[in-house]
Amino acid sequence: MLTTTISPKFQIAIPKEVRESMELKAGTKVHIVPYQDRIEFIPIRAMSSMKGFIKEKFNTTINRDKDRM
């Protein structure tokens, strides 16, 4: 688990491994969601960047019955 420290100005540095794995860039806007006993940061992404993301992560092929083709 990665850890970071909140600065006196209440700023948080996101570790490099997380920035790279989530492809975060400087200036990326995020939603901040308090949830139970944690804080979640959800990057706001343009809808155009979401095009095709399911095919990259999931197998979307469906085996169909021959009479359904």
Image: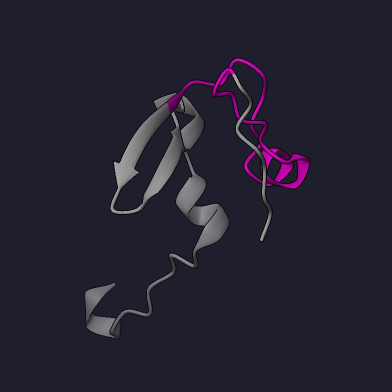
Identify the image quadrant of the N terminus.
bottom right
Image quadrant where residue 15 sits: top right
Q: Residue at x 38, y 29 (%)?
A: 31
Q: Is residue 58 left or right of residue 31?
A: right
Image position, residue 5 (x, y; %): 65, 38
Q: Residue at x 60, y 33 (%)?
A: 6
Q: Front-most of 50 and 3?
A: 3
Image position, residue 69 (x, y; %): 29, 72
Query: Where does the magenta region start and end?
Result: 9-30
Magenta stretch contains residue 45: no
Residue at the far right in the pictured view: 16
Q: Residue at x 43, y 37 (%)?
A: 42
Image position, residue 13 (x, y; %): 67, 31
Q: Front-most of 51 and 46?
A: 46
Image quadrant where residue 68 sits: bottom left
Magenta stretch contains residue 29: yes
Q: Residue at x 67, y 24 (%)?
A: 25
Which scheme is used to colour this image of the protein? Answer: one colour
Image quadrant where residue 39 sits: top left
